[in-house]
Image (spheres, rainbow, N blue to C red):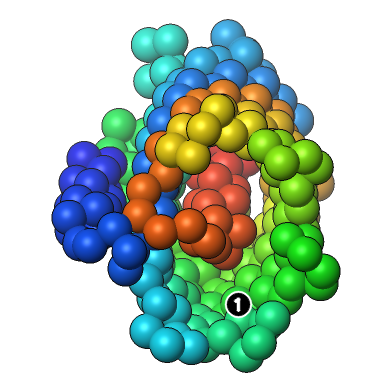
Amino acid sequence: MNTPLLVASLAAGLAVATSAPAQTWSGSVEGGLYATDRTSTDTDIEGSPFAGAYIGGMAENHFGAYRFSIDGRVEYMSDQGKDDPYVTGPVHSGVLGLHFGREFGASYVGAYVATGIFDGYNSNSPMSGSMYGLEASHTITGDVNVFGQAGYMRAIGDANDNEYKGFVARLGMSAPLTDRLNAMVSLDGGRSDDCFVDCGNQPGRYIGLTIEADYALNDKYAVVGSISHMSVYDEDDDDTGTDTSLFLGVRMNFGATGSSKALTTPISGFRAAGWMEPLD
């Protein structure tokens, strides 16, 4: 699935949701800009920091105690015309996911399946991967929420050379700071046991931290900002790529209130998979 198709699929899903009765669906559409600073111990990164844009959204519906949602996000970084991921790091990342589960009082347990894009062997043509897993959340008190996701991701950039086949996980907490300001922190990580860069007991792993805040201008619009840092490791050669990104955008809410924005499809695994070729 390439970038235009992923964007079109996301837009189509959200269009169906927003056309449904407002009291049934809840969700949001978000877009903005970001800046990203890259480092690599394997190759020289040229031109960092880079600039890019992102678009995303989610829609959710409740059927009694059951919950269904669709969400997605696409990020595109300008490589300043270099056309070489070895000197820029990955350019494209994206996910499109479906979620289904059940609420048990203050808790939720469910599963998700997703497709994603990452830079494989040719940065001009992002490649597709897949992911599936389980997820859960629990409201501790008031609007303070803890959540977790764990699954398996498959992203093959080049068979028997650049392959991510392994687990992915995300843990986090969200809480209101004021009536208008909400904060969320999440920790991501994952590991591919072999073939991250070449095959033959050559694993790779990543770990990342994201801090996000959104400020409600009114019931419909919010300003959203986040900072994330991710380190990707080629364990065999002990090489590391890092990505520190600052995002700023606007979120438009629609439908009923109470959508669960914390348990959206994790994108960090596909961001990490885009580092397989630069670290090879």
Q: Nearer the viewer, residue 40 or 78?
A: 78
Say whether residue 227 is left or right of residue 2. Answer: right
Q: In the rendered image, which residue does mark 1 sit on?
A: 135
153 vs 196: above or below: below
The residue lying at 48 percent from left, 57 percent from top is 257
Q: Secondary structure at mark 1?
A: strand
Q: Residues within 10 Å of mark 1 (few under 14, many from 20)?
A: many
- Residue 191, position as x, y percentages in the image: 68, 65
Q: Position of residue 32 (x, y in %)?
A: 45, 25
Where residue 115 sits, quadrant-wise, is bottom left
Front residue of this view, candidates 102 and 22: 22
Rendered residue at 68%/74% (across/down):
137
Task: Tell me if I can see residue 195 in this picture.
Answer: no
Callout 1 amino acid:
Glu
> What residue is at 55 percent from the left and 16 percent from the top?
50
- Please state which of residues 23 and 6 is positioned toward the viewer in this rendering: 23
Quadrant placement of the C terminus: top right
Q: Residue at x 77, y 53 (%)?
A: 175
- Residue 248 position, x and y percent, is 57, 24
